[in-house]
Image: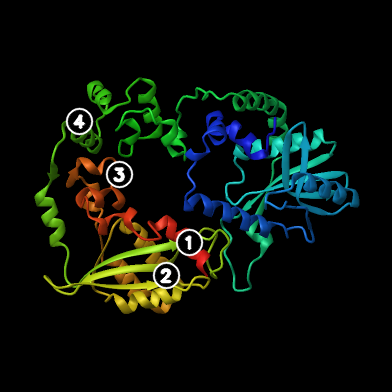
Amino acid sequence: MYLSKSIYVRVWNCQKNAWINKYHPEAVPQDANRLARFRTGDEVGDLARGLFGPYVNVTACGEDGKPDLPRMMENTRREMERGTPVICEASFSYEGLYCAVDLLKKEENGWAIYEVKSSSDGLQDKYAADVSYQKYVLEHCGVRVVGVYLVCIDSSYVLGPEGMDVHRFFKINDLWEQACREQESTVPTVLQEAERVLACEDEPAVELNENCRDCELFSFCGRDLPSPNVFDLYRLQKKKMIEYYRQGLVSFEDLDRADVIKNATQMRQIDFALNDRGIHADRDAIREFLAGLSYPLYFLDFETMQPAIPFCVGTHPYAQIPFQYSLHYIEEEGGELKHSEFLAESGTDPRLAIAEALCRDIPADACVTAFNKAFECTRLKELAAAFPDLSDHLLAIEGHIVDLLTPFQKGWYYRREIGGSFSIKSVLPAICPNDPELDYHELEGVHNGSEAMSIFPEIQ
């Protein structure tokens, strides 16, 4: 059996996930978000290599561009014999079990494992499987492991004008106790499960649980569920989803017969789905909402990026940095719909330029709309804090924003096609079906904000 660290962790997390990755890799989404996460992990890993001074990277690739594992293991052996202080991607294999250690650091009485993650939740036990597997493999290869650590991002770090301080950017967590406990109690069991599950072509019977709804493989694992089902209900707590599912209350028909749903929004969703209702519209509430709008009327939408490694002074890891906005506007009732836009140069700090453009394009006292305005309002307040000379104008814009989400979220307008989400990607096609100009899938190149966030840093 060949078992890498990543495969081991998959089995530890979910046997079915590991099985799908092996036997149905086509079911694993390969979207821009996934690729961006990989890039972020690589960038953070590269930065962490300098934590302890000079290092040797033993990575080696074959002619096909894939890692040459035998060469990497031989390089590792050679560097350890030399007593190299820090070895990156130190590689080991024991009876088909393979792992590469992000940072292997020489200590006085042995070697310490440093696992690097691009997240900021380094104290959670979810990483125990990762490091315990490495400790298990190394010790079976005869390596004296004297420390196990997790290197992750300190979310409180703020980039100063002096530039990146790698020692403040990272925080190091001691996972020795978790790794020892996990290695003794769990590793042998998981290895047996891995051998059994991955050797069998039959899909393992793993019941849906609270974590499944957020898993990228949920559509595959839930392919036999009726549509719509309990997992589609608007803002139903995960615990309740699983509770109803295990009680056999899966379809909307099941939930309706059992009369367990009491939330008005969820009840309307079930009612419209089962009875093929037309449109629900609280005309008085909608009229009152529209009466609160005035001209000139602006429609604002931001696009942002979230760099793990901050490059804008005064920002923290994964801060939302606006780099683009689209702005439609109508200057008077019955007037022409016009458009203005801003797109920053990739690779530069876009904040001042976008703040100045907003102040130029939007009058301070104008009525502005946004869909889910909390996002736009937060970005405007952040820009105002960063640039005090523009803050009055930016905060005036923020103070005049009306949320276009309100009529849908409050239930003033509903139709069956909206389903259980009031995001614009659900509402827009429901209200304007069969209009290619309003179809995200018909957009050329970049189809949504997630793709924009991933692609923008790549085009510099």
Work out whether mark 2 precedes mark 3 in sequence or the reverse, and give the earlier one: 2
Q: Are marks 4 and 2 in contact (CB under 8 Å)?
A: no
In 3D space, how far apart are the residues under numbered discs 4 and 3 (Cα atoms)?
A: 17 Å
- For the point 23% across and 21% down, which residue is it? 257
**Badge number at residue 455:** 1
Depth check, mark 4 against mark 1: the one in front is: 1
Q: Nearer the viewer, mark 3 or mark 1?
A: 1
Count of numbered labels shown in the rendering: 4
Is 289 displayed left or right of 189 in the figure? Answer: left
Query: Does residue 351 lie above or below 75 as drawn?
Result: below
Q: Residue at x 48, y 52 (%)?
A: 33
Q: Quadrant of residue 337?
A: bottom left
Q: Nearer the viewer, mark 2 or mark 1?
A: 1
**267 and 455: which one is in front?**
455
Q: Residues within 10 Å of mark 2 (few under 14, many from 20)?
A: many
Residue tagged 2 = 383
Question: Which disc is residue 108 wearing?
Answer: none
Residue assigned mark 4: 274
Give the mark, 2 or 1, whose residue is nearer the N terminus. Answer: 2
Q: CA distance from mark 2 to mark 1?
A: 23 Å
Question: Are dots 2 and 3 in contact, CB under 8 Å?
Answer: no
